[in-house]
Amino acid sequence: MKILHQNQYFVIRHFLVEEQHLFCDLFQDEEVTKYLPYRSPEQYREMFHIALEDYIQGPFGRFGIFDAQNNDFIGMCLARNFADVPGQVEIGYTLHKKYWGKGIATEVSRALISYCLENTAANEIVAVTDLDNIGSQKVLEKAGFSRIQNLKRADGELAYYLTRRH
């Protein structure tokens, strides 16, 4: 199990095979998935298996976020090549509701930015959110992202955020 980031509050690390239920259960809460594209439980199970395979390739994937004190599952985060713009790396996160509003998403985003800049050649890190997801937009701004033009896709528009290597 590889640890990507650790501080006094949380640990970002590779998921273990036996943690599939934690990953999948996170996406059963309709409030948690309100701004995410719909996926079936089977698609989430497949996503988890792909995450485990991605660890072999490195440095990208979906990672678990766990409480540093009691190992409680906080949520998941991701780092991947951004499909829309070659050369950009995308980050994202999904947290259990009980961890909303505690500054964790901001700190996770900052940790992912550092991880991506240290482990890839990318100069631009991006994140996208639903246009109505004001909470995540505020998180990204606090984490050091700047909003640029909206990202237009065939299925709609997303708020598009960017930060650059200094």
Image: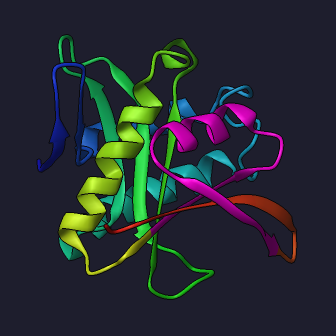
Residue 71: image location, x then y, percent: 22, 19
Residue 35: image location, x then y, percent: 75, 42
Q: Residue furthest bottom?
A: 86
Residue at 58%, 55% (x, y): give it: 146
Q: Is residue 103 rendered magenta in the image?
A: no
> Is 53 positioned to the left or the right of 30 in the image?
left
Residue at 65%, 30% (x, y): give it: 32
Q: Residue furthest front?
A: 166
| Residue 93 or residue 14, whichever sits in front | 93
Quarter of the picture containing the C terminus is bottom left
Residue 10: image location, x then y, percent: 25, 26
Q: From the viewer's perspective, is residue 11 above or below residue 113?
A: above
| Residue 160 or residue 73, whichever sits in front | 160
| Residue 25 or residue 78, whichever sits in front | 78
- Quadrant in the picture for residue 3: top left
> Is 2 positioned to the left or the right of 43 in the image?
left
Q: Is residue 146 rendered magenta in the image?
A: yes
| Residue 162 or residue 11, whichever sits in front | 162
Q: From the viewer's perspective, is residue 51 above or below residue 80?
A: above
Residue at 55%, 50% (x, y): give it: 44
- Quadrant in the picture for residue 132: top right
Residue 85: image location, x then y, percent: 58, 84
Magenta residues? Answer: 125-152
> Is 45 positioned to the left or the right of 52 in the image?
right
Instruction: Give the image's coloring scheme.
Output: rainbow
Residue at 41%, 26% (x, y): give it: 104
Q: How many marks?
A: 0
